[in-house]
Image (tube, grey):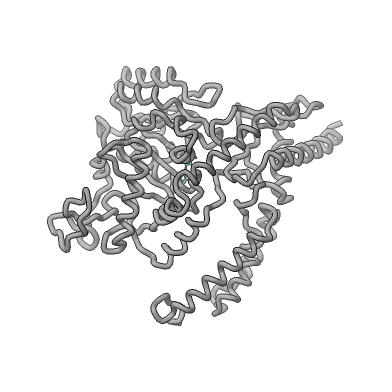
Amino acid sequence: MRSHLLNDMTAEHYRRSVTEGVERVANRLATTRRPFTGVTPDQLAPVVSAIDLDRPLGDASAALDELEDVYLRDAVYFHSPRYLAHLNCPVVIPAVLGEAVLSAVNSSLDTWDQSAGGTLIERRLIDWTAQRIGLGPAADGVFTSGGTQSNLQALLLARQEAKTTDLAKLRIFSSECSHFSVQKSATLLGLGPEAVVSIPVDRDKRMQTVALAAELERCRAEGLVPMAVVATAGTTDFGSIDPLPEIAELAGLYETWMHVDAAYGCGLLASPTRRHLLDGIEHADSVTVDYHKSFFQPVSSSAVLVRDAATLRHATYHADYLNPRPTVDVGAPPASGGLRGRIPNQVDKSLQTTRRFDALKLWMTLRVMGADGVGQLFDEVCDLAAAGWELLAADPRYDVVVRPQLSTLVYRYIPRSVTDPALIDRANLHARKALFASGEAVVAGTKVGGRQYLKFTLLNPETTTEDIAAVLDLIAGHAEQFLGENLVHAS
Ligand SMILES: *Cc1c(COP(=O)(O)O)cnc(C)c1O
């Protein structure tokens, strides 16, 4: 069994085994033309259930053969130009290379003595990101598992910095289009069910700052305490960017923590042409960035950044077995700016303990492609969304919601012959399901004003306007077929 341990004796086994796995995936990618096979849970569940986990195959080739059946053949492939659904990106090869390295070396980024250079690489990337945001010289941050955790940590810091410890009095302000992790975080942080004040959005799905000002004033008048304003830079549904400069001004006026959730919009930090869309983000007290969305990184790769490194102390706990208090410094770390002789233990800044070296993926990406390379890819999908909007706006079969700032399009099929909105809802739902079952394309759905809409999240630069047009035809076909059947039954 020791032959399966990765070490000096098994380096050759490792090379063969991983190479074979890479070969299988490469073949899959080279031959998979659709995003999905359309397999149903009922079809796949028995295949997975039939595997006897207590009878190992003993051999990587056999396990890979089996994996074709239980996973690889029917996986949802984000590299397909017709995968248009959620905030998932095709990944860049330098990042996948980084992934292979980091899992084999298996550093853990909690303490210096489990990661060494990995810690310094992560810190460089945090500094690099903070600089692109413009957070100033005292900025810091840490990599996280995703935007959900980044938002939770940012709001934890905001809670600890708030002007009261009476949790029932604290209020968080975020737009009605903000991510549900804001609400989730509020609950985890022990705030009451009323804690998140939902601010209405304008026609472009951006937070109405007049309404924000009114709610902040009302909060103060009622003797409550504003804990944080969460501005979203790229809403999950519409890619809309809240008016950051105005929100920053209000946060300043009411002495409130400003958090910018740029989980989606962070790709603009690298964009050669669209960085200005994030103007105002530099005023934030904390920022969430999901490199695994708009930096084309494999899941997971995310970070939370803060304007003032000192605020991260709210996540600091000490354990004798891990990161004893600095007074017992042993073995000075290498000389490096800002370390001041202290052992750089990233666990002091993180909600996690054992933590992946996800930063290496971004490092390899920047070292091979550069930031402009990533930013150009994101620009391409934003351009594609603009072109897709033109298509939809000119197409009488569809109602399209907002002209995109980033790369999402929300639209609804509107048949000529039918006026019952509930039936139109069902036709759109059906079209999405039928498309998924066909495996020809994958699109998302959401609600706008209580009605069922469909959504393209465009993160694949290989997708073309022809793909968009073709998928719109497919959707129309499925919707019409559904209406045909249902109108016949109704009459
Ligand atoms: C995706 C998203 C999140 C959550 O990020 P995860 O990485 O999925 O945890 C938070 N906020 C916004 C705006 C998002 O789009």
Of 133 and 108, the residue lying toward us? 133
Query: Is residue 27 positioned above or below 233 on the image?
Result: below
User: Whole-percent x and y of residue 280?
Assistant: 39, 28
The quadrant where residue 326 appears: bottom left
Residue at point 50% right, 58% down?
96
Between 150 and 403, the one lying in front of the other is 403
Left or right: residue 54 versus residue 335 is right
Q: Residue at x 72, y 32 (%)?
A: 413
Residue 162: quadrant of the picture: top left
> Is any part of residue 212 visible from this angle?
yes
Residue 333 placement (x, y as % from top left): 20, 59
Give the total number of marks visible in the rendering: 0
Q: Position of residue 258 (x, y in %)?
A: 35, 31
**Residue at 72%, 45% in the rendered image:** 435
Quadrant of the snapshot with the C terminus: top right
Task: Evaluate whether residue 181 shows in this view.
Answer: no
Q: Residue at x 52, y 37 (%)?
A: 236
Residue 202 % position (x, y): 52, 21
Residue occupying the far left of the picture: 327
Considering only vertical position in the picture, is 332 above or below 294?
Answer: below
Please state if 467 lies on the left or on the right of 418 as rendered. left
Q: Going by the image, does 301 lie left or right of 352? A: right
The image quadrant where one finds the N terminus is bottom left
